[in-house]
Amino acid sequence: MLRARSSPDHTYAVLGSVLAACGIPHDVGLAERCADIMQRAFPNATIEIGKSEASATGLTTIVARVDGARSDIPPESPLTRDLAVECQFDNNILTGFRWTAGPLH
């Protein structure tokens, strides 16, 4: 039985087109990507991004932390204005996302 083998070039072309279709910018730093993911995770809020940082926790693992504040609600509102998230990336691929302050806290 003959098997069709895909060339590495074909594999990279397919992988590249899948990544391009994801819609998340890959030409920015991981802290900026985490901020973008935070805004996409809470689309009905207007979020002003504050402090953001990324640090390596392993050879291929980077954790990004982003703080923000909702500017679409007044400061005296009972709703939480302060938001924060943490994103974990392994080889620049998002492998974890969690709210550390915000809508669920």
Image (tube, helix red, strand yellow):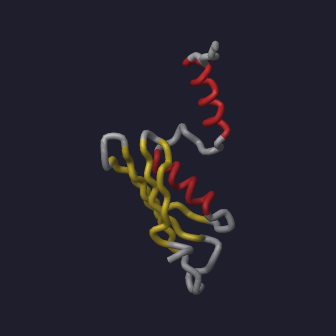
For the point 53% across and 69% down, which residue is it? Answer: 69
- The percent position of residue 68, horizontal first and vertical second, equals 51, 65
Q: Is residue 97 above or below residue 4?
A: below
> Is 88 placed above or below 81 here?
above
Relative to 70, is 97 on the left or the right? left
Q: In this rendered view, identify the residue nearer to me: 3 or 103.
A: 3
Q: Residue furthest left?
A: 58
Position of the N terminus by quadrant = top right
Q: Quadrant of residue 10?
A: top right
- Which residue is the extreme one toward the top? 2
Front residue of 93/11: it is: 11
Please provide percent x and percent y for residue 60.
36, 41
| Residue at 43% over, 60% down | 51
The structure residue drawn at horizontal position 50% and vertical position 49%, both measured from the top left corner, is 32
Nearest to the observer: residue 96 or residue 73 = 96
Q: Is residue 18 above or below residue 69?
A: above
Q: Residue at x 57, y 24 (%)?
A: 12
Give x and y (percent) for residue 94: 50, 48
Q: How many marks?
A: 0
Residue 15, compared with residue 63, is above or below; it is above
Residue 77 is situated, as x and y percent measured from the top left of the image, at: 59, 85
Furthest residue toward front: 1
Nearest the eye: 30 or 76: 30
